[in-house]
Image: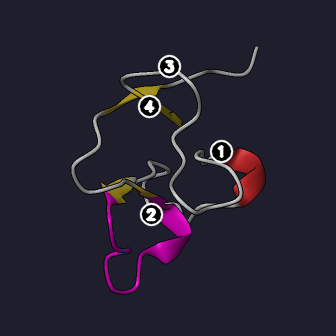
Amino acid sequence: MTLYDAYTASGLDNGQPFPSLGSRDKPVRNADGSTDLYFGPKAPEGNAANWIATVPGKGWFALLRRAA
């Protein structure tokens, strides 16, 4: 999942090294194999590994890419 700036369509400048989260980042998986992702200005307690930062007052959109 990658977040993009709604105005420029560039990667969202959110203060993280990359505005994305993928399998290589090793997000925490649920017991059923699903993965919960979190978006917001602050990481939810205990879920930082599955969080992508957003910027208050700045529009964004997300793209989900699937590995072939």
Judge depth for marks 3 and 2 and give the one in front: 3
43 sits to left or right of 12: left
Say whether disc 4 or disc 1 marks the residue closer to the N-terminus.
Answer: 4
- Looking at the rendering, which quadrant does residue 7 occupy? top left
Name the mark on residue 11. none
Q: Are marks 4 and 2 in contact (CB under 8 Å)?
A: no
Colouring scheme, one of rainbow, by chain, secondary structure, one colour = secondary structure
Q: Which residues are magenta?
A: 40-52
Say if 7 sits above or below 15 in the image: above
Amino acid type, mark 4: Asp
Residue found 50% across the figure and 55% down from its top:
14
* Three-letter amino acid code of the residue under disc 2: Ala
User: Where is residue 61 drawn, in percent x and y?
Assistant: 36, 28
Secondary structure state at the residue bearing disc 4: strand
Q: Which residue is mark 2?
A: 31
**Label 4, label 3: how many angstroms apart (C-alpha)?**
5 Å
Mark sitting earlier along the chain (2/1): 1
Q: Which residue carries the number 4 mark? A: 5
Q: Residue at x 40, y 53 (%)?
A: 37
Q: Which mark is residue 22?
A: 1
State the residue in front, 61 or 23.
61
Crowd band around label 2 with a 10 angstrom C-alpha radius: few (<14), some (14–19), many (20+): few
Q: Are marks 4 and 1 in contact (CB under 8 Å)?
A: no
Q: Say if mark 4 contacts mark 3, CB within 8 Å.
A: yes
Q: Earlier in the sequence, mark 3 or mark 2?
A: 3
Q: Are marks 3 and 2 in contact (CB under 8 Å)?
A: no
- Foreground: disc 4 or disc 2: 4
